[in-house]
Structures are given as C-alpha cells and as structure tokens.
Image (cartoon, grey):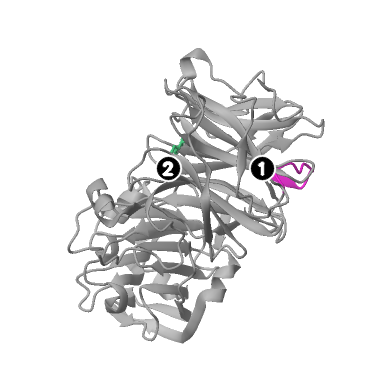
Amino acid sequence: MAQPYRTAYHFQPPKNWINDPNGPMIYKGIYHLFYQYNPESAEWGNIAWGHSTSTDLVNWTIHPPALLPSDTYDINGCWSGSATILQDGTPAILYTGGNSQKVQLQNLAVPKDPSDPYLVEWVKSPHNPIMIPNEDEKESFRDPTTAWLGPDGIWRVVIGNERENRGTAVLYKSEDFIRWTEAERPLHSSSETTMWECPDFFPVLIDGENGLDISEIFSGIKHVLKNSVARSFVDYYTVGAYDHHNDVYTPDEGSVDNESGLRLDYGRYYASKSFFDSEKKRRIFIAWVNESTSKEIDLIKGWSGLQSFPRKIWLHKGGKQLVQWPVEEIEMLRTNKVDLQNITLEAGSKREIWGVTAAQADVEISFSIPIAVLEQAEVLESNWTNPQEIANQNGSLANTGVGPFGLLVLASNNIEEYTAIFFRIFKKNDKFVVLMGCDQKRSSVGLEYDKTNYGAFLDIDPLTEKLSLRTLIDHSIVESFGGGGKACITTRAYPTLAINDNAHIFVFNNGSQHVDISTLSAWSLNQAHIN
Ligand code: DQQ
C-alpha cells in the first residue's frame, strides 16, 4: 500500500496508534522516548508505553514496550507520566494506571538492570499504587510530572487534576519516592480552565539559553507551568515564580492563565513534555501531533499520530515568553543547500524554490520590510483580537496591505493544492502588529478534514527586528517557527497531488505592497533511521 503520509524525520513507530510522549530523558548518554502506544491497532486503546532510544534525537531504535497493562492498578491502561533521575543517578518512572473501574492511580516503575543504558526492562513497584485519588476525582487524577527535590531533601511531584471546576496542579511530597502524601494546597490552579492534563513544571534561566535541571533553585531563574487543556486540545503556559518555602507557583502579572494566553504552538501540538538534557545543558520539548483525518483513514493506513521534532526551549530575554527552535542535530540531515539573497517579492508574485526535495525540507527565510512599505499597513480593527479568527478570514489570500507573504509548501505543480505559512502586518496606534498564520484550506484537494486556519500574534517590531520564518516540511507535517521561535505553528496536511517528487515550495506575496527577502536558505533533508 502506498504510504504518502509517513514521515522521513518525525518520530513514529512502524505501525499502530501513538499519542502523548512520556518520560523523555537522557541516561548514560542515550536519549529515551516513551509514548502512549496501542500495540494492537491504529486506534486508541490497550495503552502501553512504547519505547525507543536514540543517540542524537534524530535516528531512533525501537524496543519492546516498557510498560504493558498487567496488574489491577493499571489493567485499564498505562497512561501518561514522566521519568525522574534519582539521587543515585538511576531513573524512575511515575505513570498513571487505570483499574477495572477506570479509577486513575499513580504508579512507580524502575529499571530491572540500571547498568543497561537502553533500559529495556522495567519492573513495577510492589508498593503500587502509590497515590490514589479523592473520592470525587477518580477520573481526573493523572499524568505525573518529573519530580523535583527541594532544598529540604523532600521530593515533589505534580499531578494533573480538576478540582471545584478549576484546572489544578495537585502537589504530592515524599521522602523516599515510594510513600507520597498530598500537600496542604495545590502548586497552582486556575478558575479559567477545566481539567489539566500532562502538566509540565520547570525552571528557566532569566538570562541565557541553557536549560536547568528541574530541582535547581537560585535567584536567576523563573518557572514555567505548562498545561494541556482537554476541552480545547491546547497546550498553554504561564511564566512565573515558584515559592519553594510554601510550595506555590504564581504566574507573573499579565501572564494569562488560560488557553488564550501563551501557547507552545498555535497549531496541532498537544500533551507536550519537556526534559533536561544534562549532556548538552538544554531543555527539550516533544509533543504529540495527532492526525487531522478520520479514524477510518487511520485504520486503512495502519497508523496514527506523530511526535513533533524535538525543540530546544528557553526564556526570551524580555522574560515574558519562551523561545523554541528545532534541536541542532537536525542539521545532520541537511543536504543540497540552496541560497537566495536580496530578492524583492513584488505584490501578487510567487517564486519557486528549486533544487530541494520539497516534501522533505528545511527552509529559513529572513524578510525585511522597508519603512515606506510598513507605512502602508492596514489598520488593525479594534475587535480583531483573536489571531486565529483573523488568519481564518481569507487566510493567505487576503490582499489588502503588507502581506500575506511567506511560503507555500506541499504545493502541487499548478498550485491547486498547498499549505501556506504567512505573515500579515497591521498598524495599531503608532505600533505594528505581526500576525503569523497557517492557511490549510487548500492543503488537500482529495481528502476532507478540519482545515480551519491557525494564527498567532508574533511579538516582534518589524521596524527594528528582522522578520524570520523557519519551516520544516515532512510529507504530512509542517512545523513553522516565526520570529526566531517566538511563535510556532504545526499543522498536518494530506496532499493528494503534492506527494513526494510532485511537491513544490514557493515564496509568495499576496499583499498589495512589495516585501524583500534578505536571505533564504533551503535544504533537502535526508531520511532519518526511525525504528
Ligand atoms: N492521554 C493519556 C492521558 C492523558 C491524555 C491517555 C492526554 O494520561 O491525560 O492516553 O492526551
């Protein structure tokens, strides 16, 4: 069977269903990725922890599932969780199990042989379950974070929860990693959301791109709390302060505590999880990127779900938001570089980028917009506050001012089929507002799925900063990084014409003003060895 939507460098197992990334870590120089996995089918069910390892986050080797439902406390599935490196340097997994009544319970597993860098066999603790839910929270108590050690030598872990209609990060403490007790109060909660799945909590340097081990506490840091909100399928985060004496986290003033706040990605990107790479001193995020098509199509193709390409993340200098960038190891796949410089993209024009394998590519563009052009920008209407809605109105085809301009990827010969990643610049008072959008309305002429456009406001000033776009294209997934990684949009596309060698990449400008490209580099990407 032809498989035009399988990826070349985005992680997926040979077949079947996957969802959330679980317990990513580095151990004895080997990266481990576990994931929610159905060993039997391309639909969700029988959930186990699939397991793959890598030395470079690009090429992956598959191992037998690390955890399979087997005991009363996880017979309904081994759901999401995290890995923690304990004080003696060995890892431990905390995960959610469901019993036959679907009660959610937290469990512990440890490696059978810690001297094996591949950690192929895991042993469930005889003490399981080690955390049990309150009576009225039996089905809303899941997805333990990586645990952190306080300066008092006590372990802390957060569990996703909904309590009194608030998304809640319940805190548990333990001296020995086995006996856990719930803390007096949650680490944090918000009345503005519902159930928090897959919380992720970690410190970031105020000044610098290096990552930090989760337990590090000193004055030069802030903390980030990321939650996955089931009702909207959105991963949002706040930046704030962790008071480790009282074990409470407080988002900074102005940090919006719901899904309309900052998002790791404004497209398809859910249940993300980060880990500290102690070898390269960086924090890395991975997320589940699900299919946009139906279950019937998943069953026909025999697989469902991808993992996003791993991203390094750090706090932007202004201290208000994160910045994300594909891990540098992707460069080992780059080949056949194409360079273009100082090109003017006239209003209403497009230009093909020749010479790269367009279904498997990495493109970096830096735009510069002359001041005289910026002055022609449309005024942002006062009620245009939702970037997704603006991006959804005419998408890449609106042609009233500065932009939309950007990239058409997975485009067919005659451009009947394409996914557009674009910028549009507006004026608001005496400032400029940059919209980053992804137009998927014409991403497939042959298949129906949700083609609503995505949009985000990109916090950059085009007068003083370069407006950059980086896009990774991989057959049925497109990951884009605007403004050096300040806003990211991931999308799935299922072209029926623009497949393999019939795919093309164009730069385009549908605005009524010209824009300049100062530099453009594009690479073909080789196939990674995945599982
Ligand atoms: N997926 C897991 C849960 C988690 C959800 C089950 C998020 O543990 O809350 O497969 O996608």
Type of the residue with mark 2: Val
Q: Which mark is residue 112?
A: 1
Q: What label does residue 234 carry, if any?
A: 2
Give the vertical position of 146 relative to 291 (above or below). above
Q: Position of residue 167 (x, y in %)?
A: 49, 28
**Percent position of residue 24, x then y:** 59, 49
Q: Is residue 309 above or below residue 388?
A: below
Residue at image location 31% in from the left, 49% down from the top: 389
Q: Is residue 216 on the magenta stretch?
A: yes
Q: Amino acid at mark 1?
A: Lys
The answer to whether the residue bearing label 2 lies less than 8 angstroms from the nearest atom of ligand 1 is no
Which of label 2 and label 1 is nearer to you? 1
Q: Residue lying furthest right in this view? A: 152
**Other residues around mark 2 within 10 Å, as few (<14) / some (14–19) / many (≥20):** many
Secondary structure of the residue carrying numbered label 2? strand
| Ligand 1 quadrant in view | top left
Residue 435 seen: yes
For residue 64, the mark is: none
Which residue of the protein is positioned furthest toward the top in this rendering? Answer: 135
Which portion, as a residue range, is magenta?
A: 213-222
